[in-house]
Image: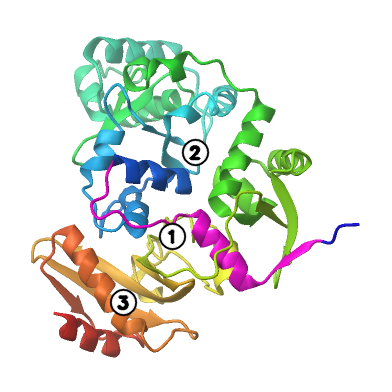
Amino acid sequence: MSTTQVLSRAQARRVALAAQGFLDPAHAVPTLRTFDRTLARTGVLQVDSVNVLQRAHFMPLYSRMGPYDVDLLRRAASGRQRRVVEYWAHVQAVMPVELWPVMRHRMEDYRARRGKWFTLDEDDELERALLAEIADRGASTARELDDGLPRSKDQWGWNWSRTRRVLDYLFTTGDLAIADRTSQFEIRYDLPERVLPRQYVEAPAVPAAEAHVELVRRAARSHGVASAQCLADYYRLRPADARAAVEALVDAGELEPVRVEGWHRQAYLHRDARLPRRVRARALLSPFDPVVWERARAEALFDFSYRIEIYVPAARRVHGYYVLPFLLGDRIVGRVDLKADRATSRLLVQSAWAEQHAPPETAAELAVELGRLAGWLGLADVVVAPRGDLAPGLADEVSRVA
């Protein structure tokens, strides 16, 4: 009779960080091969419009690859050998193009529900008009379409808001795809056959149950060790669908039920997960990084309580507006509220906080990492404001490094 493997919390952290790519050897100059390896680890790159520091989908690549040319992502998202496309994967996210057929069941679900967040009133005439216009003119933003098509209320009730909602609906159903975004971050929609490689557009839809298994399989590879809730959250599956997929993967030997010290949830270890003796990471993590986006998991693994305070009124924020966790070794040891002041070429550290378990070298290591981040962003200086218990020591170390 076999016994259930037990992982300490430290072992589980190291498994998780290795699965996320923090054990991969650095490339002196990151290339598309580095990008492919990193995307294989994260699975998806969450997209968010906030640009106070850097767009969200660029940051997980930086955290794992170090300073890289952001044109790598543009190259990966264009051309005949396009590697990635945006879709509603975790949430709005950059995902590998081969997931398009796997997401067809989700597209059909949105079609049946007439939308993702809301039920869109049927408007076949408007949908046909938009598809025809995009087919004729090519990739277009909602604003361009709104400016270029009739607006009269008696002819579809046309206005910008309605246009944008219908375009989003057609995107979620797979009738349109995201070609790219403008410099103002506006989506440019186009026909899928002009965005994606043909084999993925023409591939048959993967049945829903098989798609759930594939998505949980990918989530398990990216997490290394995870609960069913963690696995469901990665690609935003319904809990029942995720549980059925987990059971199938356990039966197939791809997942092993294990216990993690201090966890109250059943955990599962991917059969290919690595358990390194040590992880020597030093990285600032985006608020939308897979390591921390499931808050209960971040607390269970890292003893790190985290909340995004972007939408919290300024007077009620505890740590700041755009707060990045600081990963050192296999622990999250601090957090910093950062802003790229591009007009003055300064990286502003608006507050800096240490976790209770932060080692003595935290300020020094963070200062080096902030200097590296500033260089990648093209900023000349790092300026530390006197807010937070880590701020005084960090300011001293930043001055010394400079």
Label 1: element kind? loop
Task: Tell me which amino acid carries mark 1.
Answer: Phe
Residue 207 position in % (x across, y down): 65, 23
**What span is in magenta?**
4-31
Residue 84 position in % (x across, y down): 37, 33
Which residue is at a point 34% across and 86% down the rendered structure image?
390
Q: Which mark is in front, 1 or 2?
A: 1
Residue that numbered label 2 is attached to: 89
Q: Nearer the viewer, residue 232 or 281?
A: 281
Task: Tell me which amino acid carries mark 3.
Answer: Leu
Which residue is at a point 66% across and 28% down the rendered structure image?
210
Residue 320 position in % (x across, y down): 35, 72
Q: Nearer the viewer, residue 144 or 22?
A: 22
Q: Is residue 111 above or below residue 267?
A: above
Q: Which mark is residue 22?
A: 1
Distance of mark 2 from mark 3, alpha carbons?
A: 32 Å
Residue 18 position in % (x across, y down): 50, 59
Image quadrant assignment for residue 10: bottom right
Which residue is at a point 47% across and 13% down the rendered structure image?
202
Distance of mark 1 from mark 2, alpha carbons?
A: 23 Å
Residue that numbered label 3 is attached to: 366
Q: Residue furthest left?
A: 344
Q: Earlier in the sequence, mark 2 or mark 3?
A: 2
Q: Which mark is in front, 2 or 3?
A: 3
Left or right position of 301 against 169: right
- Residue 12 among those drawn in magenta: yes
Can residue 160 be seen in the rendering of this structure?
yes
Q: Residue furthest right?
A: 1
Label 2: element kind? loop
